[in-house]
Image (cartoon, grey):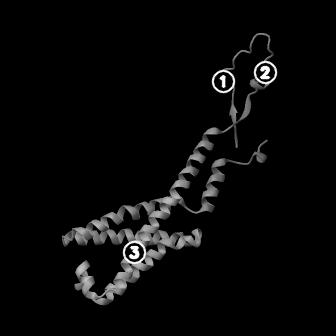
Amino acid sequence: MFYTVDTRHWSIPNPAPGAEPDDTAMTDERQIPALAPQKRNSRNRLLRIYLNPLMWTLQGWLAMFYLAAGYAKLTEPRALMVFMLEWPSEVGQGVVIASGCLEIALALGLLTPIFSWTIWRPVLLLSTGVILVKAIVLATLYLLHLNLVLAVVNLAIMPVAMAILIGRWKSGSPQRDATIAAIADGPDRSSRR
């Protein structure tokens, strides 16, 4: 990648005594390598190299948490669920089962981009958004009922879900990243005069 730069206003040092002046230094325009965009692109590439495993780690942790919570709501006896969470005593067994199924679906939604990033990325974003909203609502309800332990758990889920949502929203698809990189690199050298 090269930029055409106007060098008319540059100060050109005088050649050493007895040396011939360099004619190429006196041209009005010359092509120089664009170092700044390459540094920026390499910095962004390096950030993506470290950010992607971090995002997958956070997604895996959140998915394991929601798989375990959903599995417990589907398999544990109602008396144990009432003892642990308190809210199942106020609702029917169908709501507890629906909540467990929703949590398992959200956990699977966090992991679907493993199969195809371009197809399943919206499912990941939707699942993460629902997890964030659910954590906000449950944290509020648990704080109102003075159940501080479960409120803290949901408050801890919020920054993880927010980090995944922001990180994956910005990352886009590999095709989009390649298109943006091609636009940032500018036109081909073959198209220049």
Task: Tell which residue pokes out farthest to the top in this image.
Answer: 17
Task: Give the mark toward the camera: 3 or 1.
Answer: 3
* Sequence-first tag of 3 and 1: 1
Task: Give the mark toward the camera: 2 or 3.
Answer: 3
Q: Is residue 155 above or below residue 99?
A: above
The amino acid type, in three-letter code, at marker 1 is Trp
Give the quarter of the image for residue 142. bottom left
The amino acid type, in three-letter code, at marker 3 is Tyr
Residue 66 is tagged as 3
Please provide percent x and percent y for residue 22: 78, 21
**In this orientation, which residue lies closer to the viewer: 39 or 12?**
39
Badge 3 element: helix
- Report whether residue 155 is seen: yes
* Sequence-first tag of 2 and 1: 1
The amino acid type, in three-letter code, at marker 2 is Asp
- Label 3 and label 1: CA atoms lie apart by 63 Å
Badge 1 element: loop
Residue drawn 22% across the image and 68% down it? 148
**Residue under numbered circle 1:** 10
Residue 22 is tagged as 2
**In this orientation, which residue lies closer to the viewer: 26 or 35?**
35
Residue drawn 63% across the image and 43% down it? 38
Please provide percent x and percent y for residue 128: 43, 69
